Each structure stands twice: as C-alpha cells, then as structure tokens.
Image (cartoon, helix red, strand yellow):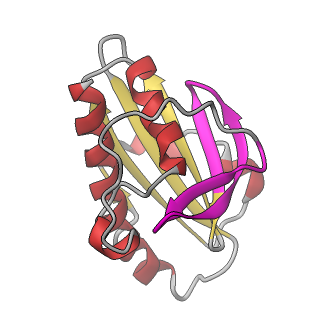
Amino acid sequence: MIGDRWGVTDAETRRHYPCDDVVPRPAWQAWRGVTVDATPDKVWPWIVQLRLAPYSYDWIDNLGRRSPRELQGLRDPEVGDPFTATAGRPIGTVLSVEPGVHLTAKLVGAYMSYVLRDDGESTRLLLKLAARNGRALGPLIAVGDLVMARKQLLNLKTLAEER
C-alpha cells in the first residue's frame, strides 16, 4: 500500500506491536521509524510529552500553537489518560503503556503503538498504526499520516538528541 512504510525494515514490520493485540486483523496498517542518537531514557520523556501536543506540523494539527520544546516533567501516562492534545484540547485515549518501552493509544479510529528499542547508544523509535475499518480509505489515510508522522518522529528525534 502506498505510504504504509517510512524508515522501517522488513523485520520491523513483521515484529509484534502492542496495537496488534487490539487490532489483530487490521483493515489497514502502517509503520514508521527513526533512529535517535540517544538512549531510551532520553527519548521516553518526549513520548510522554505527546500528551501536550502532536509535535508534527503545528500550523496544521495544533492550530498554530507551537509544541513545547522543553520537557515539562510529566508523569508517565496511565491507561485511560488522554493520549495527546491539539490546540490545548485533549484527544485520544491511552490504551496501554510500559514506561520506557511503549505507549499504545487510540485516536480517531486508529490504534497506534510507539515502541522504543534500545540499540545501546541509540534508540529505534518505531510507530505502528492500525485500523479495524477504512480499507478503501487506508491508502489515503496512510499517505496523509506519513507526512505528519514523519515530521513528528523527526521532531522527537531532534528534541531527544538535544537534551
């Protein structure tokens, strides 16, 4: 499918993600990944901080509000917490979390898992999206998400590497 992969290996698309437990037979799915030149303990606080803002193209998905560029000292998310916020309004729901390892959430009919894989001095930040419905719209959604998720992961990478 067009737009279903960016920055991931074939092995990373075959691995099990926590969202696979929620959507075992997805109508569509997509994977994104980036290597962050920082250890998982430097990356995880930025995943936690997704609760404040989307960290992609702020002028589109945050109504022009800039996503915070400094850590706010948030506690780890818990199941049932809002997943993220746009223009200061909470959206989505945290479904499962293992601090420092993964965060899985639901947002507008899509399920997503952010997974940190420790590679020693670096971290693979992987994102898988899956949906139960929307097979016909899947390619369109995947292409749109590719643009936004790529920007988000690259922003998180930059922020974690600067810390």
The quarter of the rendered structure image containing the N terminus is bottom left
- Closest to the observer: 22 or 69? 69
Looking at the rendered structure, the number of numbered marks drawn on it comes to: 0
Q: Position of residue 51 (x, y in %)?
A: 54, 49
- The segment highlighted magenta reads 79-105
Please report the residue visible at 59 percent of the width from the left and 62 percent of the height from the top.
130
- 108 sits to left or right of 44: right
**Would you say residue 10 sits in the magenta stretch?**
no
- Which residue appears farthest toward the top when viewing the image? 120
Residue 28 screen position, x and y as percent: 56, 71
Q: Position of residue 48 (x, y in %)?
A: 53, 38
* Position of 156 relative to 150 (above/below): above
Residue 13 shows in this picture: yes
Q: Quadrant of residue 110?
A: bottom right
Q: Nearer the viewer, residue 69 or 77?
A: 69
Quick check: is 83 in the magenta stretch?
Answer: yes
| Dominant secondary structure, magenta | strand
Quadrant showing the C terminus: top left
Q: Quadrant of residue 106?
A: bottom right
| Displayed quadrant of residue 62 | bottom left
Q: Which residue is depicted at the point 37% across and 74% down?
A: 63
Q: Which residue is at 67% across, 43% downward?
A: 18
Above or below, 40 relative to 125:
above
Q: Is residue 118 visible?
A: no
Looking at the picture, how far across and down is residue 153, in whole percent? Answer: 33, 47
Residue drawn 42% across and 72% down?
142
Vertical placement of residue 143 versus 105, above or below: below
